[in-house]
Amino acid sequence: MTLESVVDSYGYLAVLFGTFVEGETILVLGGFAAHRGYLALPWVIVAAFFGSLCGDQLFFFLGRRHSQAVLARRPAWKARADKANRLLERFRTPFILVFRFLYGLRSVSPFVIGMSSVPVRQFILLNAIGALAWAVVVGTGGYLFGSALEMVIGDVKRYEVEALFAIAIIGLLVWTVHLYRGRKRTTSSQSSQN
């Protein structure tokens, strides 16, 4: 099985699932794969839009219905949830439109918005606009990254596996550091409470 056949068979599904979970890295990879001709950029954007929209709607409704139970299981979210709540109170509509672009607040924000008094219809509309803008910007960024990479190293075809691997490793490292910092904050906040 070649890289081409794997991306061709599972590429859009990977973008959909990856963006449902969180996935800027997945969307950048999808944009890069579109630049290389394995995927079509408009369909990468559509998959990312639906993945992001559905994931954020799920977290919104979890916040609306199960906020205390979820927060009890995720004490690391406390500081980020407080920050997201302050931003929501101060900049309600702009915050709902751009929270996907705010590093460290992306996953907790729809949950916090669900805990607030924001009406469901308003969130759905603003969430759809924000998800579309995010999918277009990040997906196109991945596509343009492929163009820039091609200008720098010439024949990307010879290095595309390494480039995809490097992007995935960088994304994994960023995610690992983010996860480690969150756990470290949780441990230090639990130690200070005792």
Image (cartoon, rainbow, N blue to C red):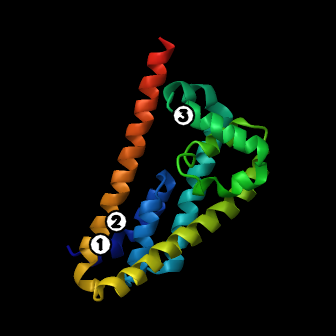
Image x and y of residue 185, in percent? 46, 30
Q: Residue at x 78, y 44 (%)?
A: 90
Residue topped by disc 2: 167
For label 2, the crowd category at 10 Å Cα-Cα, with few meaning under 14, some 14 to 19 and many 20 or more, is: some
Badge number at residue 77:
3
For badge 3, the amino acid type reads Trp
- From the viewer's perspective, tell me whether residue 42 is left or right of residue 169: right
- In depth, the one of 128 and 157 nearer the eye is 157
Residue topped by disc 1: 163
Q: How far apart are marks 3 and 1 (CA)?
A: 33 Å
Q: In which quarter of the image is the N terminus?
A: bottom left
- From the viewer's perspective, tell me whether residue 49 is left or right of residue 152: right
- In depth, the one of 70 and 158 nearer the eye is 158
Q: Distance between the residues labelled 3 and 2?
A: 27 Å
Ranked by sequence position, the earlier of labels 3 and 1 is: 3
Is 155 located above or below residue 192 in the figure? below
Q: Is residue 124 visible?
A: no
Q: Residue at x 73, y 57 (%)?
A: 126
Image x and y of residue 20, in percent? 50, 54
Image x and y of residue 10, in percent? 36, 68
Badge number at residue 189:
none
For badge 1, the amino acid type reads Ala
Q: Residue at x 64, y 38 (%)?
A: 83
**Quarter assignment of residue 153:** bottom left
Pointer 3 with pointer 1, Cβ within 8 A = no
Pointer 2 with pointer 1, Cβ within 8 A = yes
Is 109 located above or below residue 4 in the figure? above
